[in-house]
Amino acid sequence: GAGVSQSPSNKVTEKGKDVELRCDPISGHTALYWYRQSLGQGLEFLIYFQGNSAPDKSGLPSDRFSAERTGGSVSTLTIQRTQQEDSAVYLCASSSGLAGGGETQYFGPGTRLLVL
Amino acid sequence: SQQGEEDPQALSIQEGENATMNCSYKTSINNLQWYRQNSGRGLVHLILIRSNEREKHSGRLRVTLDTSKKSSSLLITASRAADTASYFCATDEGGTALIFGKGTTLSVSS
């Protein structure tokens, strides 16, 4: 079946502009995660959605970052007033179970964001 | 915050050799997972080992877990050029998200 998809693959924007990144999880997966990976670094957790529960936003680095998940499926990560330090690969993952339950996370190919 | 720390940061070997990567972590975990990443893109899940397991095999992969030392190792036997990638350990503390290390970059030359 189809895996996790993300769009766009690459995004170049100017400092101060807003960007929206999209994630389509695997159908039926209730959990959705956003991570950020800076060059040569590991993954930094941003936000977690589980079903209809309130999301865990504890990883969002500033109030310029927000995310929503409509209808328990597609998610959009929005970065307002982008800064050069926001440049990174943004990865989305989904899983079929609850976080902490040992479920495998399936990752999308990521969106490479470059802020000039 | 990062939980797992991989060692070495980079590893270069010849095809056919074995590659061993280590991961150390700091707190109690439910399980530890290893992922692979090609060319800075999406990660692929390789193997999961639970806190009550000591060793697990999957094809050419062998993972060990020592909870007393808070460490894990990933062994890739008979490496191939196609194994060239970055390998990350990720710990599951029972919280919201996996905690990833910075990864080991493996280069296998033919």
Image: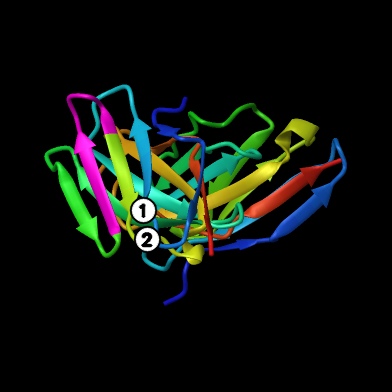
B64 falls in the magenta region? yes
Front of the two marks 1 and 2: 1
State the extent of the magenta-drawn residues as a range.
Answer: B61-71
Left or right relative to B22: residue A61: right
- Dominant SS of magenta comes to strand
Residue indicated by mark 2 = A29
Q: In 3D space, how far apart are the residues under numbered discs 1 and 2 (Cα atoms)?
A: 36 Å
Q: Mark 1 Cα within 10 Å, few/some/many (few <14, many 20+)?
A: some
Q: Considering depth in this image, is B7 or B103 the residue closer to the camera?
A: B7
Q: Secondary structure at mark 2?
A: loop
Which amino acid does the dot numbered 1 rest on? Asn
Chain that bears disc 1:
B
Q: Which of the labelled discs sits on residue A67, or is there none?
A: none
Image x and y of residue B20, in percent: 36, 45
Looking at the rendering, which quadrant does residue B31 occupy?
top left
Image x and y of residue A32, in percent: 44, 51
Image x and y of residue A30, in percent: 36, 56
- Residue A24 in view in this figure: yes
Residue indicated by mark 1 = B18
